[in-house]
Image (spheres, rainbow, N blue to C red):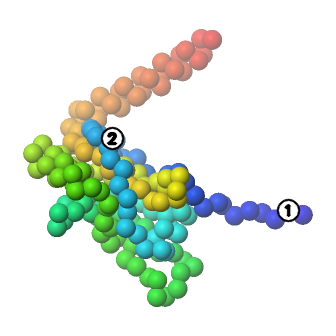
Amino acid sequence: MAEKRKKPLISHGTAAQNRRARFDYKVGDTIEAGMVLLGPEVKSLRAGRASLGEAWAGERDGEIWLFGCHISEWQAGSVVAKFDPVRPRKLLLHKKQVRELTGAVTREGATLVPLEIRFNDQGRAKCIIALATGKKQHDKRADIAKRDWQRDKARLLRDKS
């Protein structure tokens, strides 16, 4: 008799998404950045136990950091390997990229928003961050109306054929 297989860990693909970001912000340029993580954090990410809902990126000491990202503690870890689930995590970028991002934030009033954390083909965790500007309430309503119309249009076309 075959044994039941456990839910597979994420070897490559999306580990966490910030689905609310595209609704709250007009997303501009995106950049893929490496992350400085501890061993148990990587294991938790592979298990999909992370949240970007409250996360944001910012500049500290000439580097870009990810704040407010919640990565749950790895349950099978030892007592020694405990870590703070919401500690700031350093993002790995080239100096030129850091200068461009900090310049856009100060000059244009943009915000650095993390969109997702994923694993690349080599199995390394990457954070996709975007330069974004906040949407007004009427912009959000227009997006909802447009999405509803697209859904109704697809339904009408599907029913006709």
Does residue 24 appear anywhere in the picture? no
Three-letter amino acid code of the residue under disc 2? Phe
Q: Tell me which residue sits at (32%, 72%) in the image.
A: 87
| The C terminus: image quadrant | top right
Horizontally, residue 119 falls left or right of residue 34, namely right
Q: Tell me which residue sits at (52%, 56%) in the image.
A: 122
Horizontally, residue 22 falls left or right of residue 122, namely left
Check residue 23 in the rendering and tell me which mark sits there, or answer none.
2
Q: Nearer the viewer, residue 23 or 69?
A: 69
| The N terminus: image quadrant | bottom right
Horizontally, residue 138 falls left or right of residue 41, namely left
> Residue 109: x and y, percent?
13, 46
Q: Are marks 2 and 1 in contact (CB under 8 Å)?
A: no
> Residue 123: x and y, percent?
52, 59
The residue that label 1 is drawn on is 2
> Residue 66: x and y, percent?
30, 62
